[in-house]
Image (cartoon, rainbow, N blue to C red):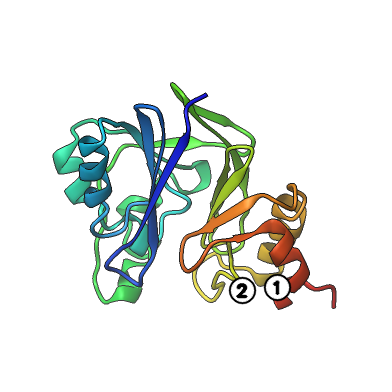
Amino acid sequence: MEDVIILAMRTAKAASMAYLYAKGRDGVLIDAGLGCHELWEEAGRRGIRIHAVLLTHSHYDHICGLPELLSRIEGLPVYVHYSERNFLRHPDLNLSTLFQVREGYDVPATPYFDGEELCFDQVGFRVIHTPGHSLGSSCFYDGERVFSGDTLFRGTIGRTDHFFGDTVQEIASIRQRLLTLPGETLLLPGRGEHTTVEMEAAHNGYLRER
């Protein structure tokens, strides 16, 4: 089996993370903040073909790199949860207005659904829908690691003080959908340092029973 390659970069808006995930010569980008095209360039240097962009959710700091990226890769599929399939186009829904800009992206988004297996040759993930930070917030699980977007961070959780945010729902999503994964599962968040499911279950103060 080919080794997994994971490269991470902090993008230029709110220091959100974008990831290159690859097995062999097949890869995807996870989230698309400003500057994420640099991961595509690195993939090219390594002979990796990027099959798709997988969005954990459609907030501006995770999508504002799409225009630059798609200008370089014509026809690259962009995947987002079904409930947010139209959010990319709307500045209020993608929260670009909170960044003091109003930007919408006319990108044909391919919807994914909870429990769906997303497969791109050697690369594959199971979708875990974790609403709370946003309506369609989702995580991508490959059996050993989970990309958690802005749902769960090291020692904290994602914000819920904006459209479709719900703290109770987010905590329930994490407890029921992420903390039930094996404890050694590596958790790669949309901001900050990586952690594990076991570490967050034991030490994340937001997830303790009250």
Whether residues under marks 2 and 1 lie with C-beta atoms below 8 angstroms apart, the answer is yes
Identity of the residue furthest to the right in this view: 210
On the image, the x and y values in percent for residue 153 come to 57, 67
Q: Rounded to the nearest whole Å, what is the CA distance between mark 2 and mark 1?
A: 6 Å
Q: Is residue 120 left or right of residue 200?
A: left
Residue at 59% across / 55% down in the picture?
187
Residue at 47% across / 37% down in the picture?
4
Mark 1 belongs to which amino acid? Asn
Is 127 located above or below residue 117 in the figure? Answer: below
Identify the secondary structure beneath mark 1. Answer: loop
Residue at 65% across / 58% down in the picture?
196
On the image, the x and y values in percent for residue 135 come to 55, 56
Q: Is residue 193 left or right of residue 98?
A: right
Mark 2 belongs to which amino acid? Thr
Identify the secondary structure beneath mark 2. Answer: strand
> Label 1 belongs to which residue?
204
Residue at 25% across / 60% down in the picture?
34
